[in-house]
Image (spheres, grey):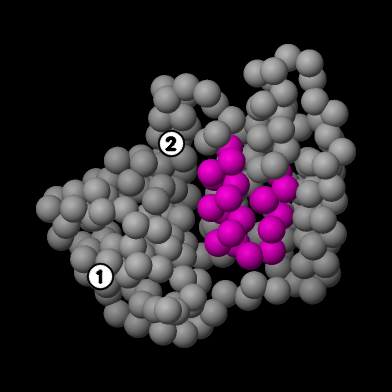
């Protein structure tokens, strides 16, 4: 099986091709596929018709967004919970990831790697508040800040998103976040649905 982060820019994928390939190589989502196939003619149409939950799944699939867009979305997710980050290493992880997103080079990559290691160490030494609910949120936010500086942008966006959504304990709160995130994608990104799994690998170093 091909690596799910291995793609090549070729021609438009149909709705069926997009969902079938990502269902095989990333994670299955048959309910989303059935709705999209029944209601959309193209993936571009899907982008504007999908519910927030379905749009987020599409947007975070490998190859849909540029690495810069993926990382900026992960940063946006983390900044929503900046107030829950007591450790400077966690906040620095977000700031360094943002600098790298706008200016990826050898120097900022080294800075990113160092910030990622420091942010992961911050999780291990984190002193949580006594209040259980607040402690849960602080821990999740700190973990998300650790993921945002992950060098691979696909991993960074998927794990950051998963972690920040788990900060909130209610379905209503998570759905509100999904609406906000879907609006961010539609406003700040230009998705490409011309990817098929052939070559052009993301750098996982």
Judging by the rendered image, the residue that carries numbered circle 1 is 17
Judging by the rendered image, the residue that carries numbered circle 2 is 178
Secondary element type, mark 1: helix
The residue depicted at 44 percent of the width and 79 percent of the height is: 2
Query: Which sits earlier in the primary sequence, circle 1 or circle 2?
Result: 1
Quarter of the image where one finds residue 171: top left
Vertical position of residue 115 compared to residue 18: above or below: above
Please tell me whether the stretch drawn in magenta is mainly helix, strand or loop.
Answer: helix
The residue depicted at 27 percent of the width and 46 percent of the height is: 50
Is residue 44 something that shows in the picture? yes
Is residue 190 something that shows in the picture? no
The residue depicted at 55 percent of the width and 34 percent of the height is: 166
Q: Residue 143 versus residue 76: which sits nearer the camera? A: 143
Residue 129 in the image: x percent, y percent? 79, 20
Q: Distance between the residues labelled 1 and 2?
A: 25 Å
Secondary element type, mark 2: helix
Vertical position of residue 105 compared to residue 169: above or below: below
Estimate how packed mark 2 is, as few (under 14), some (14 to 19) or many (20 or more) residues with alpha carbons within 10 Å.
many
Span highlighted in magenta in the image: 145-164
Residue 126 in the image: x percent, y percent? 83, 34
The residue depicted at 63 percent of the width and 65 percent of the height is: 152
């Amino acid at each position: 099986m091909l690596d799910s982060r291995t793609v090549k820019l070729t021609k438009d994928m149909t709705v069926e091709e997009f969902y079938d390939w990502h269902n095989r190589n990333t994670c299955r989502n048959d309910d989303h596929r059935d709705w999209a196939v029944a209601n959309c003619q193209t993936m571009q149409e899907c982008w504007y018709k999908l519910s927030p939950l379905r749009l987020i799944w599409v947007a975070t699939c490998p190859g849909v967004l540029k690495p810069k867009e993926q990382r900026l979305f992960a940063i946006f997710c983390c900044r929503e919970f900046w107030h829950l980050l007591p450790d400077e290493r966690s906040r620095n992880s977000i700031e360094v990831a943002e600098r790298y997103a706008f200016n990826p080079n050898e120097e900022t990559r080294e800075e990113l790697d160092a910030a990622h290691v420091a942010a992961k160490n911050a999780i291990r030494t984190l002193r949580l508040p006594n209040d259980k609910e607040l402690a849960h949120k602080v821990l999740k936010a700190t973990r998300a800040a650790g993921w945002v500086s992950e060098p691979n942008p696909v991993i960074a966006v998927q794990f950051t998103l998963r972690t920040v959504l788990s900060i909130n304990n209610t379905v209503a709160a998570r759905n509100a976040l999904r609406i906000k995130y879907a609006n961010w994608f539609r406003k700040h990104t230009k998705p490409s649905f011309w990817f098929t799994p052939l070559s052009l690998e993301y750098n996982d170093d």
